[in-house]
Amino acid sequence: MSSPSAADSNGPKSYFVNFNQDSTSLVVGGQFGYRVLSLESVDFLSEIYNNATEHSCIVERLFSSSLIAVVSLSFPRKLKITHYKKGTEICNYSYTNTILGVKLNRARVVVCLEESLYLHNIRDMKVLHTIRDTPPNPRGLCALSSNSENCYLAYPGSSSVGEVQVFDAMNLTAKIMIHAHDSALAALAFAPSGLSIGTASERGTVIRVFSVSDGSKLFEFRRGVKRCVNISCLSFSMCGHFLLCSSNTETVHIFKLEEASKESKKTIDEGTWMGMLSSYLPSSVTDTLSTLNQDRAYATATLPCAGVKNVISLVYIGDGLRLLVATENGFLYIFNFDANVGGELQLYKTHQLDDLNGDQSDGGQKVASGDKAGSDI
């Protein structure tokens, strides 16, 4: 899943919000510290843990374990790994520059700085590899596959065009470079299997999915035609059948990853007269022709307001498939989603998170007594 970084904001940020890798919990960070909320129910949010010791600007939970990675606003170059059930700090590491992003899976911890990436072994936090002199990446854009068997790291290979560098984080070798877009990258997300990757550029109109093994384009979707669209988040559903996209507009798009729909379309390839003609036409014209081969959204959801960064997820909760949208201004929106119907989703529930500045005057920590989701890694 793709999430906001600590330095990625167009204005005052209320909260850092992000789902864990399987979207069973939501982490919320801010001036109050941070909290971990269970997503077992759509009707209410139960608190698994809270820590009110310092202003937290990046918080990541490892699946449903007790491991939490935290970066504070007071010490933006320091990463702390804590075990919340034991109430202990496992380790901390300091870096040469501000930490812009942290990604976790069961094998690796990746720390993203503006021009470098550090790969740690999650078992002992030993630095296994450092990718230095990356193109300037002030937003801390990167993605780590949640599947540690296909353990890949993706990051921008250029600050001007949409090149994706894919790195094998298990074998510590470069995997492939994918030319995904003509303009700079805005979002990256791996599928749950780790075998494909979704991409979006700063233009924000076209979303693509590529094979990690050979870089071939698997799907291409058209999000819309509005100008100056900033992509907030890309995310695959846990089942791997849908790709979600949110932006600074009020609309969340859900695309269906369905191979049959591609096969039924008349493709523009080099063997057709249209394909040969396109080789002689300017890019502005060929871009228009290519829209004939782009799928539109299978479903959409409308948020109450636009212009707020968010993270998104599509998971089963209770007896149904739900679209979850957590926003930086302190709301969690839950939409019902019928995978057989699509169309416009209906808002089912809104949870307000802006009461997180509640009674935390003791500056202490709290673990929910009934937490069943705090198993160790």
Image (cartoon, rainbow, N blue to C red):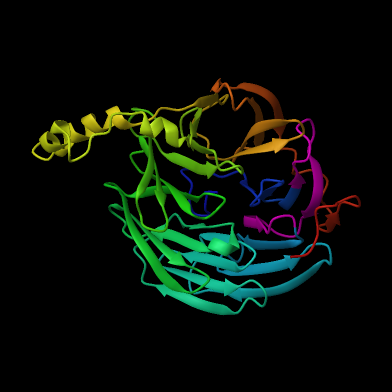
Picture coordinates of residue 303, whole percent (x, y): 56, 26
Q: Quadrant of the C terminus?
A: bottom right
Picture coordinates of residue 351, whole percent (x, y): 72, 32
Q: Does the stretch in magenta take in 183?
A: no
Picture coordinates of residue 285, whole percent (x, y): 16, 32
Q: Residue at x 33, y 29 (%)?
A: 265
From the viewer's side, name the closer residue of 363 and 95.
95
Residue 197, compared with residue 232, is above or below; it is: below
Q: Residue furthest right?
A: 369
Left or right of residue 94, residue 321 in this image: right
Q: Give the range drawn in magenta.
A: 37-64
- To which quarter of the image does residue 72 belong? bottom right
Q: Does the stretch in magenta take in 43?
A: yes
Residue 358, compared with residue 260, is above or below; it is: below
Q: Which residue is drawn at 25% across and 33% down?
A: 290
Q: Residue furthest left?
A: 280
Picture coordinates of residue 194, whole percent (x, y): 52, 55
From the viewer's side, name the closer residue of 91 and 108.
108
Residue 343, compared with residue 134, is above or below; it is: above
